[in-house]
Image (tube, helix red, strand yellow):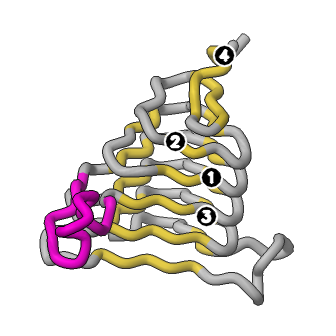
Amino acid sequence: MFGKNVNLGVRPSPHLYSGYGYIEARKKHSKIILGDNIWINNNFMLVSEGEGIEIGKNTLIGPNFEVTDSDFHDLHPEKRMGGNPKTAKVTIEENVFIGSNVKILKGVTIGKNSVIANSSVVTKSIPANVIAGGYPAKVIKEIDFN
């Protein structure tokens, strides 16, 4: 589901013609919801196999972005080809700014107004109004709005 003024791809920016945007809700109950006024830069992937992915309004996302709500394969070696992978909803609240080369994994919530630094891997939820980064991403500091 797309809100108003959703922009997929940015010109001029890396990968405009050589990268792609990939959006897939794999199961009947899987949902991908993009709020109003979202910009997602080039070469991105949004894949839901579970509870869904929701991106709040006024969010900016850099190139080479990936978000998934599933492990896609069971972690038990004997069940990897047909088991039940773990899934959990991903929520990116409104006014979030996500840098380039960021990956967000299942079960994560990113609080409103937060910033995720370039090349971060977000494995756990990030509160509102902070700058977070790293591998795995951790809060670096609170944002001072003054």
Q: Residue 74: where, in percent of width, then height? A: 24, 63
| Mark 2 crowd level (few <14, some 14–19, many ≥20, 10 Å Cα) | many
Check disc 2 and report the residue beneath it: 122
Mark 4 vs 3, N-terminal side = 3
Are the residues tagged 1 and 2 within 8 Å (C-beta)?
yes
Are the residues tagged 4 and 3 within 8 Å (C-beta)?
no
Mark 3 vs 2, N-terminal side = 3
Quadrant in the picture for residue 73: bottom left
Residue type beneath disc 4 = Lys
Q: Is residue 81 magenta?
A: yes
| Mark 3 crowd level (few <14, some 14–19, many ≥20, 10 Å Cα) | many
Left or right? Give the position of 119 relative to 121: right
Check disc 4 and report the residue beneath it: 141
Q: Nearer the viewer, mark 4 or mark 2?
A: 2
Please tell me whether mark 4 sits on a helix, a strand or a loop: strand
Check disc 3 and report the residue beneath it: 40
Q: Nearer the viewer, mark 1 or mark 3?
A: 1
Are the residues tagged 1 and 4 within 8 Å (C-beta)?
no
Q: Residue 91: where, in percent of width, then height? A: 36, 45
Mark 1 vs 3, N-terminal side = 3
Which of the labelled discs sits on residue 102, or is there none?
A: 1
